[in-house]
Amino acid sequence: MKSPRDVIIRPVVSEKSYAELEANRYTFLVHPEANKTEIKEAIQKIWNVQVLAVNTLMRKGKVKRQRYVTGRRSDQKRAIVTLAAGDSIEIFETK
């Protein structure tokens, strides 16, 4: 089994992810091969919160050009995690 820190790569910081905080939903970049159960257990273990639901999505990498060379950004797997009422994750809190 993977370590929880290997499953959760980093939080996603964007306008859309911050708008979801009011609904107690947090967005994370996760390992591409991680499943919903592993993500749920990793979040609960790292931040000691209760996870109600995990939604995952794969974002395809954009095709980018630099002069005559075309390249592609890597694909990303994201997880949108819904927490129980009263729970929160400190790293997202704005001061």
Image: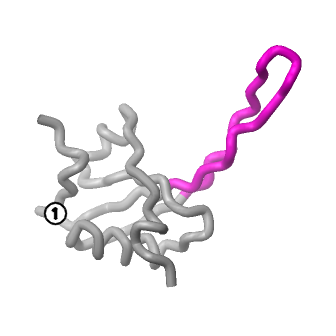
Q: Which residue is mark 1?
A: 87
Q: Is residue 89 above or below residue 22?
A: below
Q: Secondary structure at mark 1?
A: loop
Q: Position of residue 85 (x, y in %)?
A: 16, 63
Between residues 75 and 17, which one lies in front from this camera angle? 75
As drawn, which residue projects farthest toward the bottom?
A: 1
Q: Left or right? Give the position of 73 relative to 93.
A: right
As drawn, which residue projects farthest toward the right?
A: 68
What kind of residue is marked 1?
Asp
Q: Is residue 83 above or below residue 72?
A: below
Does the magenta segment cover residue 31?
A: no
Q: Residues within 10 Å of mark 1 (few under 14, many from 20)?
A: some
Query: Residue drawn at (21%, 56%), measured in percent from left and top?
Result: 89
Q: How many marks?
A: 1
**Rendered-image quadrant of the C terminus:** top left
Most prominent secondary structure in the magenta stretch?
strand
Q: Which color scheme does this rendered protein use?
A: one colour
As drawn, which residue projects farthest toward the top?
A: 67
Q: Position of residue 72 (x, y in %)?
A: 75, 37
Query: Residue drawn at (25%, 50%), measured in percent from left and top?
Result: 23
**Magenta part of the chain:** 57-78
Q: Left or right? Give the position of 1 relative to 66.
A: left
Query: Residue drawn at (61%, 69%), measured in percent from left and top?
Result: 33
Q: Position of residue 82 (x, y in %)?
A: 32, 61
Query: Which quadrant of the view contains residue 5?
Result: bottom left
Q: Position of residue 84 (x, y in %)?
A: 21, 67
